[in-house]
Image (tube, rainbow, N blue to C red):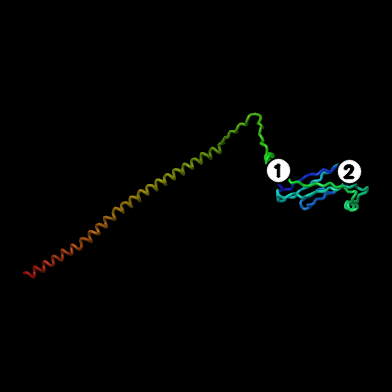
Amino acid sequence: GPFTDVVTTNLKLRNPSDRKVCFKVKTTAPRRYCVRPNSGIIDPGSSVIVSVMLQPFDYDPNEKSKHKFMVQTTYAPPNISDMEAVWKEAKPDELMDSKLRCVFEMPNENDKLNDIDASKPAPVLNTSKQDGPMPKPHSVSLNDTETRKLVEECKRLQAEIMKLTDENRHLRDEGLRLRKVAHSDKSGSPTALALRDNGSNSLPSLLVVIAAIFIGFFLGKFIL
């Protein structure tokens, strides 16, 4: 385990006899396992590796495994044309059975740590050294054409700077002039308002004086 991926176990079948042997692998849980090859012929003194692949499933430790395998063998007839016919025609006393029981094992903590350490890539040290002296950097030189271009560009930038300086000075003088005009307008406005107020205030006094003169004139005329 864990059984979240395909788990493969190999069975080695060996024929110690001097005759060819037919074999066939059966299981009580055919949907859980994939067996390759599940049948075949073993030559005398030869061996065959059978791969048993358990498909992924949710493992329950409390559930006891009831999966079993059975390897059936029989001597092969002289002329074999159909393997299915061999098993159908074989007599019970000619069959040899070997039964196997499946055991599910989960890895312990030490095995997990070993697997993690083995999966980590080993650090690689770069021990290569460059032989010979280091190459010197190439010196950069400018030709006459590039030098003239740089000089002209510097002159153009200086002219732009002088132009911007003059415009800045002109704007500054214009700002000072506008501030003076605004200051004079502000200082003149209260004076005009004061004169206007004084003129409007003196008008009723003048009318009172004129009325007093007329009243005095009429009173003097009546008295005389």
Q: Which residue is mark 2?
A: 43
Indicate the amino acid at tag 1: Pro
How busy is the neighbourhood of tag 2: few (under 14 within 10 Å), some, or many (20 plus)? Answer: some
Front residue of this view, candidates 109 and 170: 109
Q: Residue furthest top?
A: 132
Which part of the image, by quadrant, shows the C terminus? bottom left
Front residue of this view, candidates 58 and 187: 58
Q: Secondary structure at mark 2?
A: loop
Vertical placement of residue 176 versus 216, above or below: above
Among the two numbered marks 1 and 2 on one chain, the one whose residue lies closer to the N terminus: 2
Is 215 left, or right, of 60 in this rendering? left
**In 3D space, how far apart are the residues under numbered discs 1 and 2 (Cα atoms)?**
37 Å
Q: Position of residue 21 (x, y in %)?
A: 89, 45
Q: Which residue sits at x=45%, y=43%? A: 161
Q: Which residue is mark 1?
A: 107
Is 196 left, or right, of 33 in this rendering? left
Is 75 left, or right, of 222 in this rendering? right
Q: Position of residue 110 (x, y in %)?
A: 68, 39
How busy is the neighbourhood of tag 1: few (under 14 within 10 Å), some, or many (20 plus)? Answer: few
Q: Position of residue 205 (x, y in %)?
A: 18, 62
Front residue of this view, candidates 186 and 120: 120
Q: Secondary structure at mark 1?
A: loop
